[in-house]
């Protein structure tokens, strides 16, 4: 499938650099077949039905952006690493910038100013190099000690379309984390969940709408542009996740009684679809998924999707096009742009109903 099918013009001023406050005052565009309506997020309880079930991704963003130095004799180079998937107690896959300045076997010193943690400098060896600036870093520390060192030395990994326009600050430590974040390991936030407040959660409970949690550790690969001309040639990066037996059983019960599964975010959706059987039944599941959803995909489990507005030519715009129809989503995005919706991680949200439910 041609990638340019999923292109559209987005004015730069539509990119949100800060979230609105309170979180649930963000706008919410509902898309149900030909019907496109303007709402706000706090109206979500009225837009769903008693017996529906929201599925949240409870991953927690870690300070995964590390600044360091590579020394080669008298020469040195500044290197930035964005961790994106843990491969073991002492190793992470990361995107290096600039990657060309580092060779396999070389050492990178992170937190070289001595302020990273009580252990001092955090060092790693470049064990492998891959495509697109990816590398495997093996750290001198391991397990919880490594976690502590990364937390001390690292910075919040804001998306490039925000980080390129302003510096990260203390507000982002709160703003770029959901209120229910629990399982550490993500290097990007499940941004649809950023809109939820305690008050909205209470209203959802009062409306008889269930909530359940899964975990998918979102990787930095979610921001990588699609550089190929055909979707068949694009390689998705893997992300690790888990659906517990308890959650699978609860969601199967929701479907059995006629309730709808409402995925909060594309991360929850990709995990649920990875864990589903052909019948739509969910089973306990744990592992890495590189599922790539494009138009023509037959959804098995998710009925409704709440998600932010995505980049042109991105895998996520392809996913929402598969969910609600490519032409429908193009019309919806034109409406959003024309009505000054805010885009991307800190932007507004949409509530999409699956194409075959229209």
Image (tube, rainbow, N blue to C red):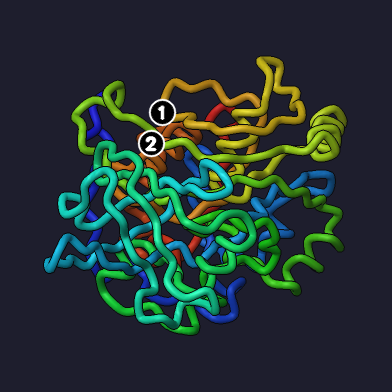
Question: Label 2: which residue?
Answer: 318
Image position of 189 with respect to 315: above or below: below
Mark 1 secondary-structure assignment: loop
Label 2 crowding class (10 Å Cα cut-off): few <14, some 14-19, many 20+? Answer: many
Residue 59 sits in which quadrant?
Answer: bottom right
Task: Determine the residue positioned at 70% across, 22% down.
Answer: 280
Residue 151 on image: x %, y %: 54, 70
Image position of 307 with respect to 323: above or below: below
Residue 183 on image: x %, y %: 67, 56
Q: Quadrant of the N terminus?
A: top left
Image position of 198 with respect to 185: above or below: below
Q: Nearer the viewer, residue 353 or 233?
A: 233
Q: Indicate which disc residue 294 carries.
A: 1
Q: Nearer the viewer, residue 120 or 60?
A: 120
Mark 2 secondary-structure assignment: helix
Q: Is residue 340 left or right of residue 30?
A: left
Image position of 180 with respect to 1: above or below: below
Give the total number of marks visible in the rendering: 2
* Nearer-N-terminus badge (2/1): 1
Residue 135 on image: x %, y %: 33, 44
Residue 67 on image: x %, y %: 33, 69
Q: Nearer the viewer, residue 214 or 7?
A: 214
Q: Indicate which disc residue 245 carries.
A: none
Task: Determine the residue positioned at 44% across, 30% down.
Answer: 292
- Residue 155 visible in image: no
């Amino acid at each position: 499938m041609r990638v340019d099918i999923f292109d559209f013009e987005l004015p730069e001023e539509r990119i949100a650099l800060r979230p609105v406050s309170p979180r649930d005052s963000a706008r919410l565009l509902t898309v149900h077949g030909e019907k496109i309506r303007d709402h706000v997020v706090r109206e979500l309880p009225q837009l769903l039905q008693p017996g529906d079930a929201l599925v949240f991704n409870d991953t927690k963003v870690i300070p995964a952006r590390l600044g360091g130095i590579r020394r080669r004799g008298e020469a040195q180079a500044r290197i930035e690493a964005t961790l994106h998937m843990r491969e073991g107690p002492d190793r992470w896959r990361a995107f290096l910038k600039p990657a060309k300045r580092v060779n396999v076997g070389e050492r990178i010193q992170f937190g070289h100013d001595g302020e990273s943690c009580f252990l001092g400098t955090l060092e790693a060896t470049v064990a492998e190099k891959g495509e697109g600036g990816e590398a495997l870093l093996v750290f001198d520390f391991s397990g919880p000690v490594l976690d502590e060192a990364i937390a001390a030395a690292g910075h919040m990994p804001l998306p490039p379309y925000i980080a390129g326009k302003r510096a990260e600050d203390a507000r982002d430590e709160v703003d770029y984390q959901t209120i229910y974040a629990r399982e550490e390991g993500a290097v990007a936030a499940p941004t649809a969940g950023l809109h939820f407040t305690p008050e909205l959660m209470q209203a959802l409970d009062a409306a008889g709408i269930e909530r359940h949690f899964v975990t998918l550790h979102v990787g930095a690969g979610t921001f990588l542009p699609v550089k190929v001309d055909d979707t068949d040639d694009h390689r998705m990066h893997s992300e690790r996740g888990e659906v517990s037996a308890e959650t699978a059983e609860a969601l199967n019960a929701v479907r059995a009684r006629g309730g709808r599964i409402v995925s909060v975010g594309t991360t929850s959706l990709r995990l649920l679809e990875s864990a589903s059987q052909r019948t739509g039944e969910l089973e306990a599941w744990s592992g890495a998924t590189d599922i790539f959803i494009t138009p023509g995909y037959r959804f098995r489990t998710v009925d409704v999707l709440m998600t932010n507005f995505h980049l042109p030519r991105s895998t996520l715009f392809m996913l929402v096009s598969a969910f609600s129809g490519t032409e429908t989503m193009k019309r919806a995005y034109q409406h959003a742009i024309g009505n000054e919706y805010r885009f991307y991680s800190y932007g507004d949200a949409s509530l999409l109903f699956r194409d075959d439910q229209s």
